[in-house]
Image: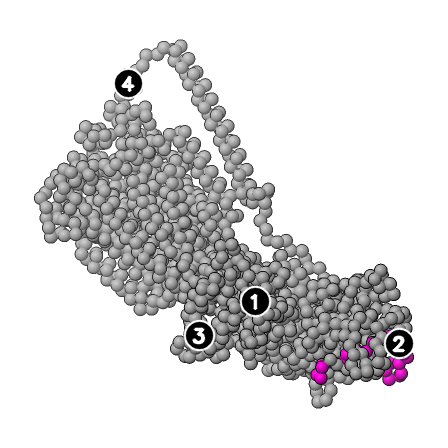
Amino acid sequence: MKNAITRWRAVAAALFALPLATVFADADLTNKHEKGRCAIRGHCGSEGFFGPKLPCPDNGPAETPDADLKKTLVEVCGDAWSDTDVCCNSEQVEALQSNLKRAEGIISACPACKANFFNLFCTFTCSPDQSLFINVTDTKPKGDKFMVTELNHFVSNDYGAEFYNSCKDVKFGATNGNAMDFIGGGAKNYTQFLKFLGDKKFLGSPFQMNFPRPNKTEYPEIVPMDKTVRSCNDTDETYRCACVDCGGSCPDLPEITANKQCYVGLLPCLSFAVVIVYSVFIGLLVIAVSGHVWYAKHSRHKAERLRLLQDLDPSDDEDEGDMVHNVSMLDRPTKHYFLNTALDKAFSKLGYVCARYPAITIVTSFLIVVLMSLGWLRFTVETDPVRLWVAPNSAAAQEKVFFDENFGPFFRAEQAFLVNDTDKSGPGPVMSYDTLAWWFDVENRVERLRSYENGDTFQDVCFRPTGDACVVQSLTQYFQGDFAHISPKNWQKQISDCANTPTDCLPEFQQPLDPKMLFGAYNESVIDAKAIIITWVVNNHAEGTAEIQRAMDWEDSLKSLMLAVQAEARDRGLRLSFNTEVSLEQELNKSTNTDAKIVVISYIIMFIYASLALGSTTLTVKSVLRNPSTALVQSKFMLGVAGILIVLMSVSASVGLFSAAGIKVTLIIAEVIPFLVLAVGVDNIFLIVHEFERVNISHPEGTVAERVSRALGRMGPSILLSALTETVAFAMGAAVTMPAVRNFAAYAAGAVFINALLQITTFVAVLSLNQTRVEANRVDCFPCVRVKRSESSYLGYAGGEEGSLQRFIRKTYAPALMGKKAKVAILTVFLGFFAAGLGLFPEVELGLDQRIAIPSDSYLIPYFNDLYDYFDAGPPVYFVTRELNITERVHQQELCARFSTCQETSLANVLEQERKRPEVSYIAASAANWIDDFFYWLKPSNEECCVDGSKPCFDGRDPAWNFTLSGMPEGKEFISYLTRWIEAPTTAECPLGGAAPYSNALVIDEKRLTIPASHFRTSHTPLHSQREFIAAYTAARRIASDISKNTGTKVFPYSKFYIFFDQYTTIVKVAGTLLGSGLAMVFVINTILLGSIQTALVVTVTVAMTVTDIIGTMALAGVSLNAVSLVNLIICLGISVEFCAHVARAFTFPSRAVMERAPRNKFRARDARAWTALVNVGASVFSGITVTKLLGVCVLAFTRSKIFEIYYFRVWLALVVWAATHALIFLPVALSLFGGKGYVDPESDGGLEQDLRSRQYPGLLNDDEYDYDSDD
């Protein structure tokens, strides 16, 4: 490539030095400006011994060329020069022909640009009217002659603009850049283009040529050059350029509307619709309530008037029934539900066996858990992000494998940002002479750096596209990494010139350096850049190979060096941020380790609370004051320890089971499953213990085994309901192909189910042992120690003390909740929350910012900040074809762009059109089109490219090489020439060789005569947010799909980051499917186990409202939707069921003893059962589920990891708050209004408490145990 650029500079120098002639001693400074008169001609020497020849001023008349000169001139410049005088000679024309032929390789792709470019120099060199548009302004004596050192070349504004427009989009395939970068220094308009052509510089114009604007006042005799200019979309097919080189030649693609949300004003359409629907609901509710109040008031007044008129005597018989029967008895369910009865018997029998034989139960359970835990021998943790977020059989994963196998793994990038933002006044220019000197030294240290284990240097592991020099993208490479090339007085200009014309300052690997890759946050001049960017490119290899280990070893050494350099930068008032290819995975693992302490503390707090709260029913302040030794006996600390151990056993068994099945553990599983199982497990422990204490009070005469049997008979079906629903809800996630979600779902479902089994067996056995200890007055934790027997708190009603929380719920909370006004208010408020949650759905972002996934103090945080703030170049993207027989003409036409028979919707044409609408395509650069460059390499006029013997390959071919592709090779001949081209180097004589730019771009199968794989490289626009990365990936998918549909060619897009964002193309659908399926299973299981469609529907709606409110909270709390939050939403659904299931079951199977405590004449039917459910399990749900989870969650607020703080603390806090409020406030109200029928609870028959209540002996119950009617 360097030779190609050098060649272009030599061409430019020669073109402007072409006019050669002999002049007299006196300088002629173009005194006459008229037709038929010259301005310069011939040459008069050079300024230095090796300097280029300079023209002589010659204001003489034009001359008629001889036959040979005319023939050569027509061959070079066209038929227009066949009959005209000229201001040049044969020597000039021959030189012109030689130099234009060399330039042709850069611009020949666009016939119009080529014609205009040739016309400019032909006219400048030989026009008979030179003096009309050329004015010599300065000369220098050379012996007896004068040399022109400066002149003005006048061109009209229209000519300059049209000339520039014809060439501005022409591509140079060897670099996948614009030809304008070479012939115009990257000019943005025609004045910059002409200035670049005319500025005197080394290997450029040998003298200063100015292109002043035409001005009749200042130059009255000047007639600016105004030749006919061919436009790149000329109607003449001879000059018309391809779409990739001329936007005007491109067909219009179907309009693509940016993927924007529908809005009504400032609100998304969904939010607006929700607001409208809720407003209508509120309006209808107000009307209904007002009508009801008016009707009730009218009816009451009418009844009073009738009573006054009739004056009837009250009857004493009206209240007679209350002397015998409680009104609530009239509303007590009388039917049995066969499934519940069967479950009650089964769980009762299970509870009796486990309590009767506790040692056998515990030992058997332990042995089974140990057996299942043997799977730990195959325990492995999956940390590779690729295998975590993308299913192996997904399109993205298969495409990555295809790309790596055919083109090699994507190179490894080590990147650093040097930023000047440490001053309080804000970021400032980062470059100074001293800073440059220091940074050159830093890069030299990197070059000399050796890896820890293998002693490799950068040269041993670097990426070498041309097989020689390593790729380092840094401003130091403008000077080949040698600070001696930097001038202390002129360094700003040196760097600016290189940035403006990268082709003048090629690095050792011979590819121009894009300033956007090197400088950050600058406006006009790179000298003002706030950051400089350095990228070391390391060769990549297949995973698990020795080569990749060597690369990672060197990267670890580089990390250590960069950490040391950070301190040096701080001393200089600068800041250095960096990233190596191995950094992210290392920091992700570190994040897990830093969170371990917080997670353990969370578990300990839940454990301590559970241990204390479990004894709350039997260990009260009053009982302790009566007999302090009660605390030692009634304590349930060891029961809490047993509960925690059971949780750990279930986790161990689950991990062992699925590890044995080959399902790897992920960091999400390691961090979440223990917390999840502990949260669920503690709930069930509370329910079993609290129910057991009630049975101790109601059936003190039974044996321990009988009492345990009764407790499990009542709570077992409830535990089954919640555990089965959670297990199925979690297991639904196993249907998802995303490994992180699938593996979590399997482990969670297994752990929850195993935990439930252990609780109804092992924990029940431990509970019976604990009760035996209590009744023997033995000290908790030290059962060998006995204390003096005191009044037993578990026998009879004399010792049965109701907890303050349970009393509050029975006396105050439950009655208030059942009030009519309260019900209306609760429904209105919670439906408002639901509507708000729905309305916030569109505000939930997709993605997982890498800065969140790593520790908050990680050295990668500043790097990612700088990457988004200062890096203004997009990632490369490849459009890959596979199994396409490009040896056939029809398939060649599906890919090419620069030939007249290429399909309008060919791959290259579509990509070029998409580049011109980056707001929807996110494509920033033209594609590197290997097939076009290959065919141009075959062009006979490129005499130094494809050569057979001593002549061009296609010279004299029939049919000849042409723009219709009719003369191009096919079949075996195509493969033969392609093999030669892909090995051809890029040289000064032939810049179209394929070795450097395309050696890794295609795979050639010479046996099958086909191209199994090839790619067309382009790049994305700068991407600065998760939303933009997702949009870019989605756009690339759309583009590839359109190309495949239009051409029939199998095309897919590939970029290194795609595999991490593939999940977001389906995550919304996956989330909807998982949550919808989970809710469906909640409904089905609740219908079966509760025996009521209505009640199951109320529970399902409540769970759905809870999850909706959590999603709305995610939008407000800045929690985006990704695999991590999707796992959390599955957890939320399962645990929401845990909150609701026990209340719903207590409503469906109300406790007779509790229901008969309802205030007489105040609650009837569903109200009475809803009141009973709250009184019966409300305290357990609050203290055992809500408070336990709340304590555990709050500890997570102190984690150092942002991912834990955002995705676990915020979401789980929202879960606890919304699930508790819905279960304890909304659900009882909804059940009282819409709940289904109730059934007899088999465990409510018999017992001391029920017997006393059935006989209506409240005096034998504790004070305030029986609620009389009141007006409260």
Task: Look at label 2 and name its amino acid.
Answer: Gly
Label placed on residue 60: 2
Label 2 – label 4 distance at C-alpha: 141 Å
Badge number at residue 554: 3
Tell me the mark number nearer the camera, choosing from 3 and 1.
1
Per the model, the C-alpha gap separating discs 3 and 4 is 98 Å
Q: Is residue 62 left or right of residue 104?
A: right
> Which quadrant of the structure image shows residue 202?
bottom right
Residue 832 x/y as whole percent? 47, 38
Q: Disc 3 on helix, strand or loop?
A: helix
Q: Earlier in the sequence, mark 3 or mark 4?
A: 4
Kindly identify the amino acid type of the residue bearing the numbered disc 4.
Asp
Q: Can residue 1027 be seen in the rendering of this structure?
A: yes
Q: Tell me where the magenta segment starts and ends, as one range.
A: 48-72
Q: Earlier in the sequence, mark 2 or mark 1?
A: 2
Q: How far apart are the two marked residues, 2 and 3, measured between alpha carbons? A: 70 Å
